[in-house]
Amino acid sequence: MDGKLTLTVSRMEGTSNAKCRLWRLRLFVDGKPAKSKRFHGTYGQAKAAGDEFKAAYAETMRLSGYDPDMTFAEYAERWLQRRRDSGSFENQTIKANAAKVDGLCRVMGGLKLSEMKRADVVDALLGIKGGAIGGVELMNSTVRGYHTVLKQIMDEAVRDELILKSPVDNVKPPKSDAREKHALPFDQYTKLIDDLTSMRGDAHAVGILLIALNGLRRSEAVALEWDDDLGDGLAVFDSIENMSGEKKKTKSPSGKRIVPMTAETRKLLDEWKPMQALMLRSRGIEQTPQTPLITNIKGRRMAADTLYRWWRKFGPTMFGVDCTIHELRHTFLTYLAKDGDAFALKRIAGWSKISMADTYVHADDEADRAAMRAFEDRIGR
């Protein structure tokens, strides 16, 4: 511990030390405010309490490795290593955090942690948005990710008692400019299902159909294997990590679910399974219960990004549909919500709470009117 630690004891009431019974104990590190607290008692008691306060804080500084010259980059790397060592975060999350830390360190890594101000944060985020990292201007939604990670780092520094207050506290993240998700009109949705059905011999089309007909996430669709086909349902117990391609648990415990099988999905899988077996056999691969439902041209599990890129290329040109894969999940859940009860919707979607419907289920004025008519019929008015 190299920082100089000093204590002040000041009155908060009374006209003299003898009459005062409320005191403020303040600690300074290298002349800068570090921590403070109130104390009730006599002046002598306040002085003794201040000495204990100072000693305890000095020990905290020693254990936390306080260094007045520690840079943001040095502390950010410590923060990242802690997350790695904790084992509480997915590998994909750690990689995403590392990318954000690398970008932040490029624009503010040399700043002393203890001297960082709000203006430093504002300038850094503006620089990142303007292209200081990759040379191109970034969308607000991307900059929001940097803001989130920077806030997590500086909040940790506050908890470590290396700084008194986070300079990010009064910096709002930029407003999101990501396109609002929407559901396809029903006639366009059903036409898409018909068009994809006509391509059942294509693994990409099968993957998109599984999403559009069952509301799966694409990481869940590519994780499915033939032993997840239960005959009358799909066992959605796993997902595939995008960066590593490794199997992992679903997004949340609620994501582990069995999606009831519709006749359309049953027919899809019954036709696709022998087609896939024939294609795999031509490459010397035997189809087994552990074979992924969606395979690439080499007979291996198709990557979620491959499915994403295929849909991005052919969705507009081949099917005339301008939506993301995730919006196909939105579309399915929107129309499912019109015919099912709220808790069935929650279970099939794999949500942890029903309030997620506010994000995924989109407004339909006619459905709202139909609901009110059904209510009127029920009460006989």
Image: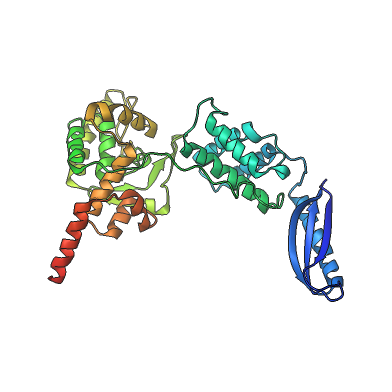
Q: Position of residue 102 (x, y in %)?
A: 60, 33
Is any part of residue 150 visible from this angle?
yes
Instruction: Please state if 173 lies on the left or on the right of 12 as rendered.
Output: left
Residue located at (51% from left, 40% from top): 145
- Asked which quadrant contains residue 75, the reply is top right
Between 167 and 313, the one lying in front of the other is: 167
Q: Position of residue 69 (x, y in %)?
A: 77, 40
- Asked which quadrant contains residue 148, the reply is top right
Residue located at (74% from left, 40% from top): 70
For the C terminus, give its image quadrant: bottom left
The colour scheme used here is rainbow
Residue located at (25% from left, 59% from top): 341
Is any part of residue 339 visible from this angle?
no
Instruction: Please state if 131 lies on the left or on the right of 278 as rendered.
Output: right
Residue located at (75% from left, 54% from top): 34
Q: Position of residue 159 (x, y in %)?
A: 66, 53
Between 332 and 111, the one lying in front of the other is: 111
Query: What is the tally of numbered marks visible in this picture?
Result: 0
Q: Position of residue 213 (x, y in %)?
A: 24, 43
Furthest-front residue in this view = 15
